[in-house]
Image (cartoon, rainbow, N blue to C red):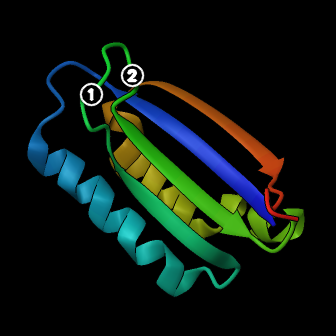
């Protein structure tokens, strides 16, 4: 399994309506990008200081499936129209996820 993890830090003043629009856009992606195997996202729980504000974790069968997602027009449009205007900082990693019980 190929996993993509991205963390966002929102700009000061990012409003709840705009953040909800990001979540709605993310929620729609698995319906239009068939290479997504599992898709989880949400706001930081606020337990620890200094955390990022939002996380997305996406699983794919392989790197090629991730690249389809990365470059898909619906994903690119969501980034440009809803995420980028709120974004102060972004970090990401992609890795081959292993089963810890194997």
Q: What is the residue that sits farthest to the top in this orientation?
A: 50
Disc 2 marks which residue?
Answer: 51
Q: Is residue 74 visible?
A: no
Question: Relative to residue 81, is residue 85 depicted above or below?
Answer: above
Question: Relative to residue 76, is residue 32 depicted above or below?
Answer: below
Tag 2 and tag 1, C-beta contact below 8 Å: yes
Q: Which residue is drawn at 83% across and 58% down?
A: 98
Residue 6 in the image: state x and y as whole percent.
56, 41
- Quadrant of image for the N terminus: bottom right
- Quadrant of image for the C terminus: bottom right
Residue 12 in the image: state x and y as whole percent.
20, 18
Q: Which residue is drawn at 69% across and 58% down?
A: 70
The image quadrant of residue 99 is bottom right
Q: Is mark 2 on a helix, strand or loop?
A: loop
The image quadrant of residue 43 is top left
Calculate the distance from the C-alpha at mark 2 to the C-alpha at mark 1. Answer: 9 Å
Q: What element carries label 1?
A: loop
Label 1 Cα neighbours within 10 Å, binned few <14 / some 14-19 / many ≥20: few
Going by the image, does 75 lie left or right of 68? Answer: left
Residue nearest the observer in this picture, 54 or 67: 54
Q: Which residue is drawn at 70% across and 61% down?
A: 71
Q: Which of marks 2 and 1 is in front?
A: 1
Going by the image, does 35 lie left or right of 20? Answer: right
Residue 86 in the image: state x and y as whole percent.
31, 33
Going by the image, does 45 lie left or right of 84? Answer: left
Disc 1 marks which residue?
Answer: 47
Label 2 Cα neighbours within 10 Å, binned few <14 / some 14-19 / many ≥20: few
């Amino acid at each position: 399994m190929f996993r993509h993890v991205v963390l966002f830090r929102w700009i000061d003043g990012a409003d709840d309506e705009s953040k909800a629009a990001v979540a709605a856009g993310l929620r729609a992606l698995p319906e239009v990008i068939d290479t997504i195997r599992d898709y989880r996202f949400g706001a930081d729980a606020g337990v620890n200081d200094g955390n990022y504000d939002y996380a997305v974790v996406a699983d794919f069968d392989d790197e090629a499936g991730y690249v389809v997602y990365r470059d898909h027009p619906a994903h690119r449009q969501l980034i440009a129209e809803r995420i980028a205007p709120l974004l102060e900082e972004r970090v990401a990693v992609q890795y081959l996820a292993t089963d810890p019980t194997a």
